[in-house]
Amino acid sequence: MSKLVPPHGGKGLVCCLLEGAEREAELKKAAGLKQLEISARAKGDLIMMGIGGFSPLNGFMGKADWKGVCESFTMADGTFWPVPVTLDAEKAFADGVAVGEEIALVRKGEVFATMTVTEKFEMSEEDKKWECYQVFKGEGADSADDKFWEVALADHPGVQMVMAQKEVNLAGPVKVLSEGEYPTEYKGVYLRPAEVRAMFEERGWANVAALQLRNPMHRSHEFLAKIAIEVCDGVLIHSLIGNLKPGDIPADVRVKAIDCLVEHYFVKENVIQAGYPLDMRYAGPREGLLHATFRQNYGVNNMLIGRDHAGVGDFYGLFEAQTIFDKIPTPADSGKALLCKPMKIDWTFYCYKCDGMASLRTCPHTKEDRVILSGTKLRKALSEGAEIVPHFGRDEVLDILRAYYEGLTEKVEVKMQGAASGAAM
């Protein structure tokens, strides 16, 4: 019997991906169905439902699940879930589809899934705004604060994505027919939950931590991973390989940089690198909860949560992604509760006087003695060709990143926020 944490939701890995003859038959049927062009976000959600990463979900959420998740972190059946997983469609398309009808879900000419439509519900501008407030707000945000909405609509990519969604949400179970480009473009890195679990079992791991990455690993990331290795059986360095916002570093460059870092600075037997196919939702603390939820499906029971985890600009407090774990409901049925726990780490940095990596809990020195590390700060310096201060990153990794930026034909603008600059320290 496995010693790993069970998949979320109490139903094992719920995998909606069809393969072999069953897939071919469904693809043939899909050619005769009405086709809905889906977003990049929905494509990633489908793939995660296909491989079991979003267990126990087997399709896009209906209104009761959407409302429960937004309002109280739980679906209609009481299962914990932190962010809505919905599928939007233009009203004209939705009006032409009957409840009970099957449709094909298509992205840029490729059929990714079929779906049986079990529900349709309209999303007014006020509904979208309500969802944004529930999901993207920081502590102390006021839904009636016009300034909050003015700033959010201008600068918060997650809010912008929701407000741009079409007028109707379609719900229903899916049959997933493609994993897109990930198995070929990220061979050996893109891994299904069952594959990662098998690797943990083979190594005898039961107590596993995950490090979430959407930036190349700098010294703070390395330090977090090594803290976890000291107290766990091993660490999964798990990178987002779906779409990011403009200015972020592409997945293939980040994977190459992580490979280099693991090769030279880790005991390889204690680390597994993998990637997952989602787009960022930029949901801040709620996204931290999502990271823990689907990591549980990969067999992870500890989610590393550091400073400004999944943060966006200055919308969230530095440790809101940690404290939100203390506020979520605990369903009576343990199978419906979140079992992956946060491994909360304080603000980390390099300290010249400590002569090494440290945190606010261990370093007694001043801000002037510290090298403040952040992915945003690193990207800004690289994009401007500025000198990287000593101890910010490993030389081998910085060489890879400099080569990427030198190869760009257009300059990338990177905005600095207070947390990344160290202003709040």
Image (tube, grey):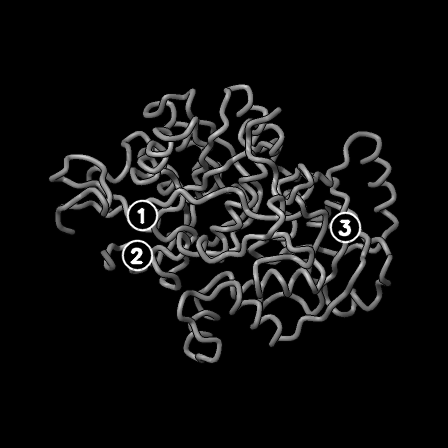
Total label count? Answer: 3
Residue 419 image label: 2
Q: CA distance from mark 2 to mark 3?
A: 41 Å
Residue 173 image label: 3
Quadrant of residue 96 in the image? bottom right
The amino acid type, in three-letter code, at marker 3 is Pro
The amino acid type, in three-letter code, at marker 2 is Ala
Query: Is residue 167 positioned above or below 307 on the image?
Result: below
Q: Position of residue 211 (x, y in %)?
A: 43, 39
Q: CA distance from mark 1 to mark 2?
A: 8 Å
Tag 2: Cα neighbours inside 10 Å, few (<14), some, or many (≥20)? many
Q: Position of residue 414 (x, y in %)?
A: 36, 55
Tag 3 or tag 1, which sits nearer the N-term? Answer: 3
Q: Which residue: 86% across, 57% down?
A: 100
- For the N terminus, the image quarter is top right
Q: Position of residue 343 (x, y in %)?
A: 40, 42
Mark 3: secondary structure: strand
Tag 3 or tag 2, which sits nearer the N-term? Answer: 3
Q: CA distance from mark 1 to mark 3?
A: 40 Å
Residue closer to the observer: 218 or 246: 218
Quadrant of residue 123 in the image? bottom right
Q: What residue sits right under mark 1 in the picture?
A: 374
Mark 1: secondary structure: loop
